[in-house]
Image (tube, grey):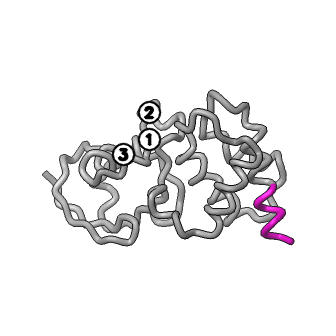
C-alpha cells in the first residue's frame, strides 16, 4: 500500500492505496465521486477527465499514487462555478447533451478551453475536444455551446 495525501474538491484526503489503483477507481470507489465516468479505461475516450492541478487529466490512466500532493477537481466541485454554469446552460440550449455519459469529461475539457483559450475559434475548439469522444451528438451542439460561452464572456 502507498500512503497519499491529496486535495479533492477542496477537501484534504489521506488514504492508503494500492500502487496500481487508477485515480478514476480511487475517486469512484473509495471517495464515491461517481460523476467521473469510466469509458474505455485506456485514456482514449475522455469520459473520465478531471482537473489535476488545474489541468485536464484522464483519470483512468493516472495512478492515484502519482497524484500525491495534487489538487483534484471532479465534476461534483463545479456546482457554484460561473464558467461551468454558463457551459451547462449552453450545452442545454445548443443540444450538446444526449445520453450524458461523456458529459462530465466534456464539460471539464470545455471549461479548460473557455478559461485558457478565450479567443479559440471553431477549429481550435475541435482540436482541444479531440480527446473527448461522444457517440451521440455529432459534436455540433457541443462546439456551438463552447463558442456561445466564449462569445458571452467576451461581450
In the picture provided, is 73 more to the left or to the right than 104?
left
* Distance CA(mark 2)–CA(mark 3): 11 Å
In the picture provided, is 91 more to the left or to the right than 51?
right
Q: Dividing the picture into quarters, in which one does residue 136 lie?
A: top right
What is the secondary structure assignment of the residue under circle 2? loop
Which mark lies nearer to you, 2 or 3?
A: 3
Q: Earlier in the sequence, mark 2 or mark 1?
A: 1
In the picture provided, is 112 more to the left or to the right than 33?
right
Badge number at residue 37: 1
Residue under numbered circle 3: 24
Closer to us: 31 or 130: 31
Magenta residues (range): 148-155
Within 10 angstroms of label 1, few (less than 14), some, or many (20 or more) residues? many
Q: Earlier in the sequence, mark 3 or mark 1?
A: 3
Image coords of residue 150 (percent x, y): 78, 62
Badge number at residue 102: none
Image coords of residue 99 (percent x, y): 58, 33
* Distance CA(mark 3)–CA(mark 1): 8 Å
What is the secondary structure assignment of the residue under circle 3? helix
Which mark lies nearer to you, 2 or 1?
A: 1
Q: Earlier in the sequence, mark 2 or mark 3?
A: 3
For this orientation, the residue located farthest to the top is 135
Image coords of residue 23 (percent x, y): 34, 49
Within 10 angstroms of label 3, few (less than 14), some, or many (20 or more) residues? many
Within 10 angstroms of label 2, few (less than 14), some, or many (20 or more) residues? few
**What residue lies at 32% left-to-right and 46% top-to-bottom?**
28
Residue under numbered circle 2: 42
Closer to us: 79 or 36: 79
Amino acid at each position: 500500500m502507498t500512503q497519499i495525501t491529496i486535495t479533492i474538491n477542496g477537501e484534504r484526503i489521506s488514504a492508503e492505496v494500492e500502487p496500481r489503483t487508477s485515480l478514476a477507481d480511487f475517486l469512484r470507489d473509495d471517495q464515491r465521486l461517481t460523476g467521473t465516468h469510466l469509458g474505455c479505461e485506456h485514456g482514449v475516450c475522455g469520459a473520465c477527465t478531471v482537473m489535476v492541478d488545474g489541468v485536464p487529466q484522464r483519470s483512468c490512466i493516472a495512478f492515484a499514487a502519482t497524484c500525491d500532493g495534487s489538487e483534484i477537481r471532479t465534476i461534483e466541485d463545479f456546482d457554484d462555478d460561473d464558467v461551468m454554469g454558463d457551459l451547462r446552460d449552453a450545452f442545454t440550449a445548443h443540444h450538446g447533451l444526449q445520453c450524458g455519459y461523456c458529459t462530465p469529461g466534456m464539460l471539464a475539457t470545455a471549461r479548460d478551453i473557455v478559461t485558457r483559450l478565450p479567443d479559440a475559434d471553431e477549429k481550435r475548439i475541435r482540436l482541444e475536444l479531440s480527446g473527448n469522444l461522444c457517440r451521440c451528438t455529432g459534436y455540433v451542439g457541443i462546439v456551438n455551446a463552447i463558442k456561445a460561452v466564449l462569445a458571452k464572456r467576451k461581450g
